[in-house]
Image (cartoon, rainbow, N blue to C red):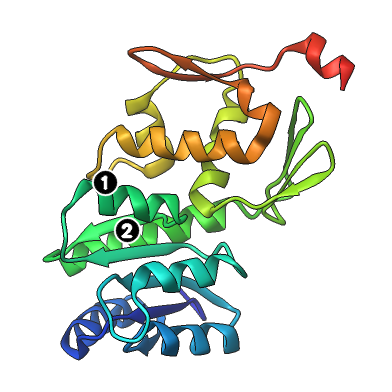
Amino acid sequence: MDNIKILIVDDESRMRKLVKDFLSKEGYIVSEAGDGEEALDIFMNNKDISLIILDVMMPKMDGWETCKEIRKYSQVPVIMLTAKSDERDELLGFELGIDEYITKPFSPKILVARVSAILRRTSDAVTEEKLTAGGINVDLSAHIVTVDGRNVDLSFKEFELLQYFIMNKGVALSREKILNNVWNYDYFGDARTIDTHVKKLRSKLGDKGDYIKTIWGMGYKFEVDDERIDKN
């Protein structure tokens, strides 16, 4: 946990203190912001922040706008906190590139477990490995994806999803299996989360998005057509 920095953004000081106390006990270095504008100032001056816990309803700049601004500069993992349980809000969060979505009230211990799981997966991805499939190149150490030499900006979760697809090329993957391996077993959402991320990933990959085949009633398969590769 040494030197791992986390930014908590919430207009409720009691909520910030509660979360900070639990995270600090685990050895994380925690910064606080009471609104989106303050959060952006802190983030821009501390580019080594490893994860952001972001509330939705805040003065000056809400969580949605804050996340949009952060995503212009960074793919840092974001956990979104909200008092709402509306499905549309959850899907909007994933559309903006958040990595986890937690509805208030929540257990601080569960939040800490989610933080640890995300940071562990982030750390595990830092290797010298590079994956290549049909013109898609994934540099796991630099966290960079290129399609036919063109850089593609992916959120952390989209990156993990693409990595999982390529590593299981040609294998039919159920939504449950994808949830368990990409979102981890402690995710409390449902399969709609996967469909939302696959839709965005396909869009960002352009023509290469066709490699992600839908298996109706089951899930997905990443399948590269060899003839198509030879033509590119």
Q: Mark 2 falls on what kind of element?
A: helix
Q: Residue at x 81, y 9 (%)?
A: 227
Q: Residues within 10 Å of mark 2 (few under 14, many from 20)?
A: many
Q: Does residue 62 appear to the left or right of 162 in the view shown?
A: left
**Relative to residue 74, is residue 179 depicted above or below?**
above
Quadrant into which the C terminus falls: top right
Looking at the image, can residue 81 be seen? yes
**Relative to residue 195, is residue 92 depicted above or below?**
below
**Amino acid marked by disc 1:** Asp
Q: Residue at x 34, y 80 (%)?
A: 9
Q: Residues within 10 Å of mark 1 (few under 14, many from 20)?
A: few
**Relative to residue 91, is residue 79 depicted above or below?**
below
**Which residue is nearer to you in this view: 155 or 120?**
155
**Amino acid marked by disc 2:** Arg
Name the quadrant containing residue 73: bottom right
At which x and y percent is residue 151? 76, 49
Q: Residue at x 59, y 14 (%)?
A: 170
Q: Does residue 157 appear to the left or right of 108 in the view shown?
A: right
At which x and y percent is residue 167? 61, 29
* Image mark for residue 114: 2
Furthest-top residue in view? 227
At which x and y percent is residue 152? 70, 48
Furthest-right residue in view? 231
Quadrant into which the N terminus falls: bottom left
Which residue, given by chain and number where applicable, does mark 1 sit on?
186
Name the quadrant containing residue 137: top right
Q: Residue at x 34, y 39 (%)?
A: 193
Labels 1 and 2 touching (C-beta < 8 A): yes
